[in-house]
Image: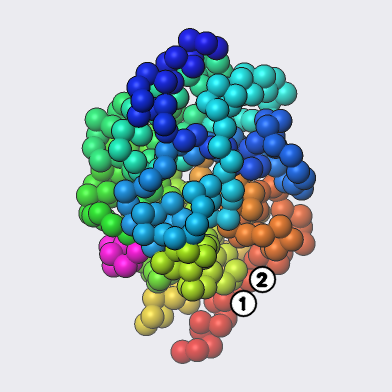
Amino acid sequence: MRALSQCLRKSATEAEMKIRLSAGSALVLGLGHGRCDVLPTTAYVMCGDGCVRSCAFCSQSRVSHTGRDDLLSRVTWPEHDADTILQALEADVSGRVRRVCLQVVDAPGVLETVHRLVKSIKSVRPDLPVCVSASAYGMAEVQLLLESGADRVSLPIDAASERVYRLCKSGSYTRTVRLLVDAARAFPGRIATHIIVGLGETEHEMALCFQHMADEGIGIGLFAFTPVRGTSMQHVSAPKLSTYRVAQVVLYLITRGYARANEFQYSKDGSIRMFHRPWNEVRMLIAPRAFETSGCPDCNRPYYNERPGDVPYNYPRPLSEDEYNEALELVYSRLEEVCSSY
């Protein structure tokens, strides 16, 4: 373990980089205290601080004023020593942690340190899949992360269209999507992205984005916009649950090959009026899994977008029959609402 510590602290820059563990992950690994009715099945680690990006919805953004640096969405991320996290992962022989996900803050020099951290994780737990979610700027950085031992790299676009991207993110939507596509073609099955529902996109834009990603073999992790005090979008409302349920069904139908985005019927404002078949046929295609957390295998991220006690946007566990029927009813009622308004 001493060698690992030395590897992780090769330079002053790397020594200063903050490494945080989500509160739920800390509970699972025995590094935190508290209670949680659903524990994460992935260990979520956040690397770096001082993000250079200006995403309007993110508490880590350089333009956010949350007054704290241990927040990402609704989750708190206490700081831990790297060796402590590695030792806890090595000691997790029960298999409670099935994956490690590194959430990388876009700070100078951070990817080189993440490269070393992934190698260290794989050295103590070679059986444990590792995903890195980061803002890479080119194929060389994607390749570096994969060569370090990551089985998957996620390059978040967050916004479902260039129009929405310009409203809430910095950088270039076109270049980011181009890198996603190039990486997915170079490394099939190992590239993913994140898309957030509720940033101002239409359902038509969302469906087209899902279709493009699916056609290129890019995995999709779906999130609900969460307003956080101190961010530029703190006063924007979270999406209605029915809106999110429709997005989940669209994602499920498209990624399973049951339908394509151009087969749905849309209203003038871009809302979905009808899927590719009558509802009584479509609902037979939709499994309960459609309403569980999407993304990497074994990623359930409980309470990332909602408070305990609320009906979750993403169920972090299998649904009961009642929950499944309620989710389907929300989708149907949303379709009826759109149709009745035209």
**Residue at image location 66% in from the left, 42% down from the top:** 24
Please state if 2 lies on the left or on the right of 314 as rendered. left
What residue does disc 2 label? Answer: 329
Q: Which residue in the structure is indicated by mark 1?
A: 333
Q: Is residue 54 visible?
A: yes
- Residue type indicated by callout 2: Glu
Classify 234 as above or below 26: below
In what element is the residue under mark 1? Answer: helix
Is 77 in the magenta?
Answer: no
Q: Nearer the viewer, residue 34 or 304?
A: 34
Disc 1 residue type (three-letter)? Ser
Residue 164 lies in magenta, yes or no? yes
In the picture as drawn, the residue positioned furthest to the top comes out as 3
Relative to 340, residue 126 above or below? above
The answer to the question of whether label 1 and label 2 lie on touching residues, with beta carbons closer than 8 A, is yes
The span picked out in magenta is 159-168
Classify residue 207 by image quadrant. bottom left
Residue 41 placement (x, y as % from top left):
64, 37
Near-viewer residue (59 or 153): 59
